[in-house]
Amino acid sequence: QVQLVESGGGLAQPGGSLNLSCAASGSTFTVNVMGWFRQAPGKGREMVATMKYNKPVNYTDSVKGRFTISRGNAEHTVWLQMNGLRHEDTDVYYCNAKTRAGEIIIDEYWGQGTQVTVSS
């Protein structure tokens, strides 16, 4: 069992910053991909940033140059540093972890989500 706990969401002004954190616990030894998704009402979940261990990170185009995903000293802890926030970034952000072998996703886990609101 893997549990994901997000924190760091909240209210920011346009151009401001927030730092999201995701801590994974439980049987995390098989997890090899972690990342962040976001979802607006009535829309599917959009990949924001993902990190494969020992691989380059992957960002969706709309956040390149503004958001940075990083891995902490803990084996399965990731952050999403969000700078230059825009109104369009307002969404619920979800931490995601996967156990993947080639194209096959063996296991996938989701956090409960943390609200990010950008407003003046």
Image: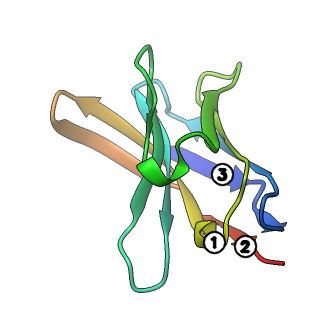
Residue 70: name its quadrant.
top right
Mark 3 or mark 2: whose residue is earlier in sequence: 3
- 66 on left or right of 10: left
Residue 100: name its quadrant.
top left
Q: Amino acid at mark 2?
A: Thr
Q: Which residue is mark 1?
A: 90
Q: Is residue 49 visible?
A: yes
- 118 on left or right of 97: right
**Residue contact at pointers 1 and 3, CB within 8 angstroms:** no
Mark 2 or mark 1: whose residue is earlier in sequence: 1
Residue in the image at 42% along x and 48% along y:
60
How far across and down, in percent of the image, does residue 101 sit? 21, 27
The crowding category of the residue bearing disc 2, from other C-alpha atoms within 10 Å (few below 14, some 14 to 19, many at least 20), is many
Front residue of 27/46: it is 46
Q: What is the number of the mark on residue 117?
A: 2
Q: Amino acid at mark 1?
A: Thr
Q: Amino acid at mark 3?
A: Val
Residue found at the far left of this picture: 103
Q: Which residue is mark 3?
A: 5
Identify whether 2 is placed above or below 40. above
Image quadrant holding the C terminus, namely bottom right
Identify whether 41 is placed above or below 61. below
In three-dimensional space, the C-alpha distance between marks 1 and 3, rounded to whole angstroms, equals 20 Å
Q: Is residue 1 visible?
A: no
